[in-house]
Image (cartoon, rainbow, N blue to C red):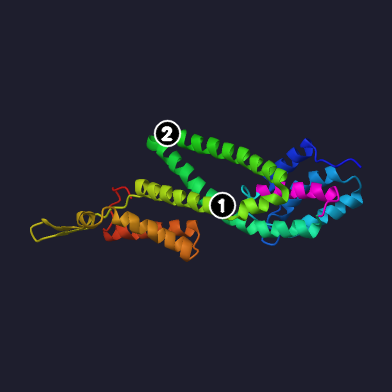
Amino acid sequence: MEKKKISKKALSKSFKNWFYGNLTCFSQEHMQTFGYLCAMLPIIKDLYETKEEQKEAMETYKAFFNTEPQIGTLVVGMTAGLEEARANHENIDGEMINGIRAGLMGPLAGIGDSLIVGTLIPILLGIGLGLSTGGSPLGAIFYIVVWNALMIFGMRWAYYKGYALGGKAVQMIVGDKANAVRESVIMVGTIVIGAVAATWVNINTSLKMYNSHGGVIINLQKTLDGIFPKILSAAAVIFAWWLMSKKKISPTIVMLIFLIVAFVGVLLGFFNPGLSY
């Protein structure tokens, strides 16, 4: 009996379905389940001839699924390889495929959030901000072009790498070496985020105390700079991190809090609206 092989056309369509539709019919109940079903449909149709076989195979992918979309592409490619093995009557069943999916979606979500959301995006935005000095459109163009290029080629590589590795991808993703690499990249990303904050966050106070003759007794900003330069900027960054990380407050609410603080600070004379914050 000839061994079944997923066609290049089916693999390409499966990847495109995931790339464009990983959040298809997204809801709190199903998350990425329907996007996953759309991505696996071309694979199932290519491997199984009858409607009954296709329906039975698709039952595997009805289970809840949610992960970081970019890094999570690896799971979609890997299960395509596992599905091919199942179609060829290897020792793989739906329970095994679902077990691998469930076991990987959590670690991949953590890796993806750390590397993509917590590291790559801030780095790209930091570079974009630098290129946007003086109102230049280069920063926006840089971010749009580089982000999309990295995502298209990166997700495509992850999909086909997962397909080639099949079940072997599990150890590559959650093994000790992978964890060491992830921690190293997170450390680099943290350093970069700190540099971006030090460069772009600039908070100064205009608060001064005068004597009876109009002379300045205390210039709070100069005093603070003598103790710890940019201490107000550092405090603002740490406060924002504490609100989002420890109190789980959304970035939008954090920005609203800072807006209120700035408004009240100007009214009380702590901030000067003419200064850059």
In the image, residue 109 sits, relative to residue 153, either above or below, namely: below
Does the image show residue 172? yes
Most foreground residue, 152 or 78: 78
**Does residue 82 show up magenta in the picture?**
yes
Provide the residue designation for mark 2: 136
Provide the residue designation for mark 1: 177
Residue 250 at x, y = what percent? 50, 59
Cα–Cα gap, marks 1 and 2: 42 Å
Range shown magenta? 73-91
On screen, residue 273 versus residue 140, left or right, reads: left
Q: Main secondary structure of the magenta part?
A: helix
Give the mark nearest the N terminus, 1 or 2: 2
Task: Give me the residue at 64% from left, 50% from top.
Answer: 72
On screen, residue 115 versus residue 202, left or right, reads: right
Residue reaching furthest left?
Answer: 213
Does the image show residue 132? no
